[in-house]
Image (tube, grey):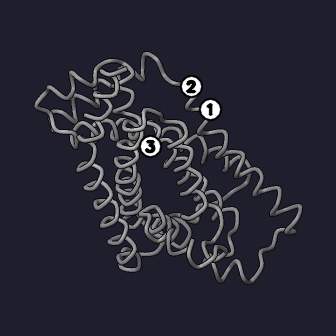
């Protein structure tokens, strides 16, 4: 916990002094654009109504609420990955990876410290997105507090777990943009952020279920759109936590090998 707290304080200090506004705009912009396009489509094309198929597939007739929650979750995922998955390759680019590897600190508390700072920043940015949605006329019901807290935990574990193997891929390959953008496309397509997964072919739906973000989205929507009690989301919650921990375990297992590969490549360059 000492390592996690020290990392959180360091990253928070850096954020206060040099806030990456380009990340903020790049993450908030698509979220607001998604909500605006959904609002225009709902009113201008759909006439303020949704089909029976959408209601049956999504479990709600509140199209704007459905898209807003999904856009917020996708923004959270994007923001967390931009911080957590790029932590090690950023250390390499700044020339501190070798020093980090020589310290006795474990990778998990270090990454938890990075994730904690990213989580705080992401929550503040999500407030901007949800505030904009409220100004546009989107209204969400009061969520069940216990289920909502569980959904936030599930989303955190899901994104944190996904980020660690991606971090290993980034530092091993020596690049970040192609890897992270590929991940964003995959989770955006498969995890049902802005449309029901039933629209996808069966093989893609199966692949989506292998990603913890899919179960996290179901928990989050059940808590925010239906005020579902914790008993109704226990199954998806356990699936999300199990998959997230599995991805994290695999990532922590391969990350040291990826770091050594990155250092060896840098030494031979």
The residue that disc 2 covers is: 21
Sequence-wise, which precedes: disc 1 or disc 3?
1
- Which residue has dot 3 on it? 80
**Side (left or right) of 56 relative to 47:** left
Closer-to-camera residue (251/152): 251
Which secondary structure, mark 2? helix
Which of the numbered marks, if any, corresponds to residue 25? Answer: 1
Q: In this orientation, which residue lies closer to the viewer: 170 or 145? A: 170
Q: Looking at the image, can residue 141 be seen?
A: no
Q: Quadrant of residue 48?
A: bottom right
In the figure, 100 relative to 220: above or below?
above
Give the residue drawn at x 23%, y 40%: 256
Q: Earlier in the sequence, mark 3 or mark 2?
A: 2
At 42% across and 37% down in the image, what residue appears?
173
Q: Measured from the top left, where is residue 168 in percent x and y?
A: 35, 43
Question: In the picture, which quadrant includes the N terminus?
Answer: top left
Q: Label 1, label 3: how many angstroms apart (C-alpha)?
A: 15 Å
Q: Quadrant of residue 56?
A: bottom right
- CB within 8 Å, label 1 to label 2: yes
- From the viewer's perspective, tell me whether residue 7 is left or right of residue 209: left
Badge 3 local density, few (<14 within 10 Å), some, or many (20+)?
A: many
Residue 189 occupies which quadrant of the picture?
Answer: bottom right
- Compared with 118, 31 (above or below) is below
Name of the residue lying farthest toward the left? 104
Quick check: 84 above or below 206?
A: above
* Crowd class of label 2 (few under 14; some 14 to 19; many from 20; radius 10 Å): few
Q: Secondary structure at mark 3?
A: helix
């Amino acid at each position: 916990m000492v390592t996690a707290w020290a990392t959180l304080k360091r990253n928070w200090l850096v954020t206060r002094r040099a806030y990456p506004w380009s990340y903020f705009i790049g993450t908030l912009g698509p979220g607001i654009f998604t909500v605006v396009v959904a609002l225009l489509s709902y009113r201008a094309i759909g006439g303020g109504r949704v089909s029976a198929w959408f209601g049956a597939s999504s479990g709600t007739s509140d199209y704007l609420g459905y898209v807003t929650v999904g856009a917020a979750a996708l923004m959270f995922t994007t923001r967390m990955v931009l911080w957590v998955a790029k932590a090690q390759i950023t250390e390499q680019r700044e020339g501190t990876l070798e020093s980090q590897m020589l310290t006795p600190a474990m990778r998990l508390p270090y990454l938890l410290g990075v994730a904690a700072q990213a989580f705080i920043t992401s929550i503040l940015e999500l407030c901007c997105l949800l505030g904009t949605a409220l100004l546009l006329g989107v209204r969400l019901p009061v969520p069940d507090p216990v289920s909502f807290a569980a959904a936030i935990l599930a989303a955190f574990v899901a994104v944190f777990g996904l980020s660690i193997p991606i971090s290993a891929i980034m530092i091993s390959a020596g690049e970040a943009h192609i890897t992270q953008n590929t991940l964003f496309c995959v989770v955006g397509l498969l995890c049902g952020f802005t449309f029901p997964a039933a629209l996808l072919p069966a093989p893609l739906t199966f692949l989506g279920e292998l990603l913890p973000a899919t179960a996290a989205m179901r928990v989050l929507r059940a808590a925010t759109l239906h005020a579902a009690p914790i008993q109704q989301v226990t199954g998806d919650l356990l699936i999300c936590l199990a998959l997230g921990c599995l991805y994290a375990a695999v990532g922590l297992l391969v990350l040291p090998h990826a770091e050594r590969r990155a250092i060896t490549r840098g030494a031979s360059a």
